[in-house]
Amino acid sequence: EDVVIALRRAQRTRHRRPGQALGLPSDLRDRLIGACPGNLAGLRDRALISLGYDTLCRRSGLVALRLDDLTRLADGGMLALIRRAKNDPFGDGREGYVSMRSVALLDEWLCAAGIDEGWLFRRIGFESVGPNPLHPHSVGRILKQRAAAAGTSAEIADALSGHSMRVGAAQDMMAAGMGPL
């Protein structure tokens, strides 16, 4: 244990820039969604990828979403209440807009999974939906798996992480001329 602590202290003395997650821009997002099969896991993953991009959620906020966190809007979209985030230590929450496309994908998943309360994104085993939510680390694995199925290079698939949807959506917004608020 003393060695581990000493190594951590030594690493902290070297300043280094943190690595940036590879962004998942809208064109790559669409390829990943298109690569999802029509089974339960594929329906869940389509909705997860689309909703994660729309709401700019971190992976922990995405898997923590519950059905009662969603509010349908008159325009066909939704608002998703993200209850807690790393930059929200007091749990005030924020609302993220969910596009009509994501609403359709989410509705398809919820109907197929028979979810009418509780967690939105759940574990699937033997083609049945479990009661527990996905673990946050599952988001990165899902993105990597769908990227490989979409025929992306191994380098791109490996670089995707649970933060990629958030980064890609922010990059797309900046490219569209939406600067910081």
Image (spheres, rainbow, N blue to C red):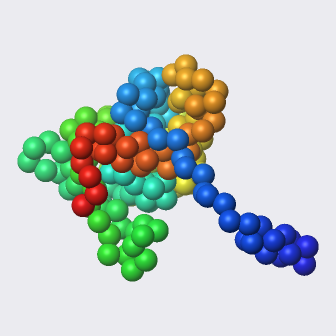
Q: Position of residue 164 (x, y in %)?
A: 48, 44
Q: Position of residue 146 (x, y in %)?
A: 53, 30
Q: Residue at (60%, 57%) from the top-left corner?
A: 18
Q: Residue at (43%, 47%) from the top-left corner?
A: 167
Q: Position of residue 141 (x, y in %)?
A: 60, 41
Q: Quadrant of the C terminus?
A: bottom left
Q: Is residue 57 above or below residue 151?
A: below
Q: Which of the 4 quarters of the picture holds residue 9?
A: bottom right
Is residue 143 rendered to the left or right of residue 13?
left
Q: Residue at (55%, 49%) from the top-left corner?
A: 20
Q: Which of the 4 quarters of the picture holds residue 66?
A: bottom left
Q: Residue at (66%, 60%) from the top-left corner?
A: 16
Residue closer to the observer: 12 or 125: 12
Residue closer to the observer: 132 or 69: 69
Q: Is residue 13 above or below residue 33?
A: below
Q: How many numbered circles does the render carry?
A: 0
Is residue 102 rendered to the left or right of residue 75?
right
Name of the residue lying farthest toward the top? 151
Is residue 14 rendered to the left or right of residue 83?
right
Q: Quadrant of the N terminus?
A: bottom right
User: From where the camera sits, is residue 41 visible?
Assistant: yes
Q: Position of residue 144 (x, y in %)?
A: 58, 35
User: From where the camera sits, is residue 130 visible?
Assistant: no
